[in-house]
Amino acid sequence: PELSNICDITCLEIMNIDSSNIIPSDWRIMAEAIAKSYSSYDGFVITHGTDTMAYSSSALHLMLRNLSKPVILTGSQVPIESPLTDAKKNILDSLKTASYGRHGVYIVFNGRIICGNKAKKMHSEAFDAFHTINGEDEGKIIQGKVCFNFPLGEPPAGDFSINTKMEEKILTIKLFPGADPDIISYASEKKIKGIVIEGYGAGGIPYRGSDFIAMTEKAVKNNILTVVATQCIYDGTDMSKYEVGVLAQKAGALAAGKMTYEAIITKMMWSLG
């Protein structure tokens, strides 16, 4: 009943799966469902499992071009049928945020409004599951009122469209002391199109014992897009700080900057697509 004074709602079930089973073609289905109904609605709320929600929000941020309406993703840590569920609050907050009319893709969760390509799930059980990484929340819902931290920017000038092509032949390599760089040779053999190397600290890639620098250079020469990220949650990569980063850049690797891991993966898939 709390929704009756907020907006008129139409519901469409496009899939019903555990979010751990989400694959890139599912993002395409979401984008196409929005595109099909785009002219008929003022905003969209997607209820989604929490485990891969940050991937989906980041993918939709890229797929939905010249978006002039709100697209909100939300879910819950506790199932909606439980008396202790957070689902009802999150859905109510999401519909209020969508009704506000602010264009863009967002995750609304536990009173936070988070830009879709800056969100990360930080807790597996706590209600405050999603945080903004390397930035501030876009806003909050305080005592039922939507409050944004930044002024509303101008909507895009171009016409809305979708671009849903995604290259799925992507490989992530998480470094650890003693890791075998031959895994990059495997990537070349399997015709991998992009590699994300999760390096140390600000983006360090080792060359002593396990020469990942030489193998990175080989991958780049084989036209494999190679991006260096960090295993740290905050502050991102700065490969100009230390020799182990400078050499990786000279080998042709790109720095991921302050993007989340989810944003790096989806942007690589989308860019290559």
Image (cartoon, rainbow, N blue to C red):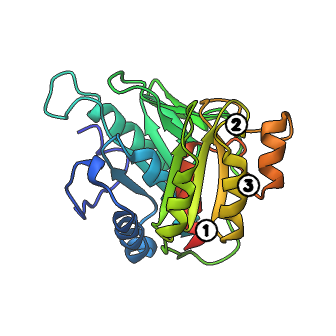
Would you place residue 31 above or below residue 129 in this image? Answer: below
Instruction: Specify the label residue 236 is tagged with.
Output: 2
Of the residues shown, which amino acid type is indicated by label 1?
Ser
Disc nearer the start of the sequence (3/1): 3
User: Disc 3 and disc 1: Cα gap in Å?
Assistant: 16 Å
Would you place residue 87 above or below residue 216 in this image? Answer: above
Q: Position of residue 129 (x, y in %)?
A: 42, 28
Which residue does the numbered mark 1 point to in the structure image? 271
Indicate which label's residue lies in the foreground, 2 or 3.
Answer: 3
Q: Is residue 170 left or right of residue 234?
A: left
Q: Position of residue 16 (x, y in %)?
A: 19, 56
User: Mark 1: few, some, or many residues within 10 Å (few <14, many ≥20)?
Assistant: few
- Residue at 42% from the left image edge and 24% from the top image edge: 128
Of the residues shown, which amino acid type is indicated by label 3?
Ala
- Residue at 80% from the left image edge and 51% from the top image edge: 249
| Residue 75 visible in this rendered orientation of the protein | yes
The quadrant of the picture occupied by the N terminus is top left
- Element at badge 3? loop
State the image quarter where residue 13 is shown.
Answer: bottom left
Disc nearer the start of the sequence (2/3): 2
- Element at badge 2? loop
Which residue does the numbered mark 3 point to in the structure image? 253
The quadrant of the picture occupied by the C terminus is bottom right
Q: Nearer the viewer, residue 130 or 137?
A: 130
Of the residues shown, which amino acid type is indicated by label 2?
Gly
Q: Nearer the viewer, residue 202 or 222?
A: 222
